[in-house]
């Protein structure tokens, strides 16, 4: 039984550490932009650039699915959370523009 608790604790802490290196941004989409050269998926296809309310830097979606989720969020006026890879300790407000989202959660 102690072994199972030990494994559960290790799993929990390893999961928390996975998020520690991510920049987290939350809010509603204020702007969407199509066809920007900096926002491409892994196949080179252009994806949406977007800004969240209260932020000044652009972020990029990384796939057709993520771009569809952004459109749905904007049309439904729903909040979302965007997680991006940490860029030298940057925050949601200070990261370089056109940073690609690792994943997006719609509320």
Image (spheres, rainbow, N blue to C red):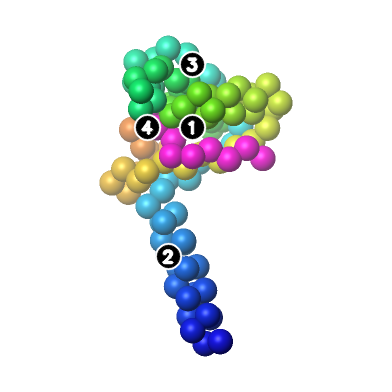
Q: Position of residue 68 (x, y in %)?
A: 58, 24
Residues at circles 4 and 2 in contact by the CB criterion of under 8 Å: no
Name the residue at 46% across, 61% down: 15
Label 1: which secondary element: loop
Q: Who comes first in sequence, dot 2 or dot 3? A: 2
| Residue position for label 3 | 33
How far is mark 1 from mark 4, CA to CA? 13 Å
Can residue 70 be seen here? The reply is: no
Closest to the camera, between mark 1 and mark 3, is 3
Residues at circles 1 and 2 in contact by the CB criterion of under 8 Å: no
How far is mark 2 from mark 3, CA to CA? 36 Å
Q: Main secondary structure of the magenta part?
A: strand
How far is mark 1 from mark 3, CA to CA? 15 Å
Q: Which mark is residue 55?
A: 1
Name the residue at 36% across, 37% down: 95
Q: Which mark is residue 99?
A: 4
How far is mark 1 from mark 2, CA to CA? 30 Å
Which quarter of the figure is the N terminus placed in?
bottom right
Q: Position of residue 53 (x, y in %)?
A: 56, 30
Closest to the camera, between mark 1 and mark 2, is 2
Q: Who comes first in sequence, dot 1 or dot 4? A: 1
Which quarter of the figure is the C terminus placed in?
top right
Q: Who comes first in sequence, dot 1 or dot 2? A: 2
Q: Which residues are magenta?
A: 98-107
């Amino acid at each position: 039984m102690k072994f199972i608790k030990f494994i559960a604790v290790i799993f929990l802490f390893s999961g928390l550490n996975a998020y520690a290196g991510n920049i987290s941004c939350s809010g509603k989409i204020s702007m969407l932009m199509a066809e920007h050269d900096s926002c491409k998926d892994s196949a080179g296809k252009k994806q949406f650039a977007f800004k969240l309310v209260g932020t000044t830097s652009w972020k990029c979606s990384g796939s057709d699915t993520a771009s569809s989720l952004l459109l749905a969020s904007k049309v439904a006026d729903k909040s979302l959370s965007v997680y991006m890879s940490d860029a030298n300790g940057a925050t949601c407000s200070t990261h370089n523009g056109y940073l690609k989202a690792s994943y997006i959660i719609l509320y």
